[in-house]
Amino acid sequence: RGAEKTPGEGKVANNVIYDIVTNKGFTSEVAEKIGAKMFRAVRANLALFSQKQQRFLQDDDCRLVQLFGASRRMAGAGGADAGGGEGGEGGSGEAGVVAAAASSSDADGMMARVREFA
């Protein structure tokens, strides 16, 4: 459907994923729970993106952060985060490992949305 794929791998190129997740239309009409999962999946996989892309994906100018990052921080601060825990320090240690494992299914859901959007 027009998405670039890496040669021989059948995977979508990272820059295409970046273009999609930063497109305002990608986050429009997304339920809070799904948006929060997409946000967590992107954050858990930041290493896939260039340094410049990583900075934007963590910036308040990023639509994904605007819509779902603030609610994530507020839920974590209130102890009401049902997602189980990356902790407030960037998801290091055991909590980061657990969050990364849980984000695998989140990433699958996000990739399904990417394929629909592309």
Image (spheres, rainbow, N blue to C red):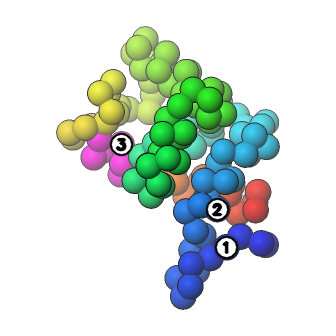
Question: Is 41 drawn above or below residue 7 in the view shown?
Answer: above
Mark on residue 21?
A: none
Residue 80 vs residue 64: left or right? Answer: left
Q: Classify mark 2: residues with Cα within 10 Å, few (<14), some (14-19) or many (20+).
A: some
Q: Residue furthest front?
A: 52
Q: Which badge, 3 or 2, is on the more N-terminal residue?
A: 2
Q: Which residue is mark 2?
A: 16
Q: Which residue is mark 1?
A: 4
Q: Which quadrant, please, contains the N terminus?
A: bottom right
Give, as a single range, the part of the protein colored magenta. 96-103
Residue 74 vs residue 96: left or right? Answer: right
Q: Classify mark 3: residues with Cα within 10 Å, few (<14), some (14-19) or many (20+).
A: many
The residue under the point 47% across, 54% down is 50
Secondary structure state at the residue bearing disc 1: loop
Q: Is residue 104 visible?
A: no
Secondary structure state at the residue bearing disc 2: helix
The residue under the point 56% across, 21% down is 71
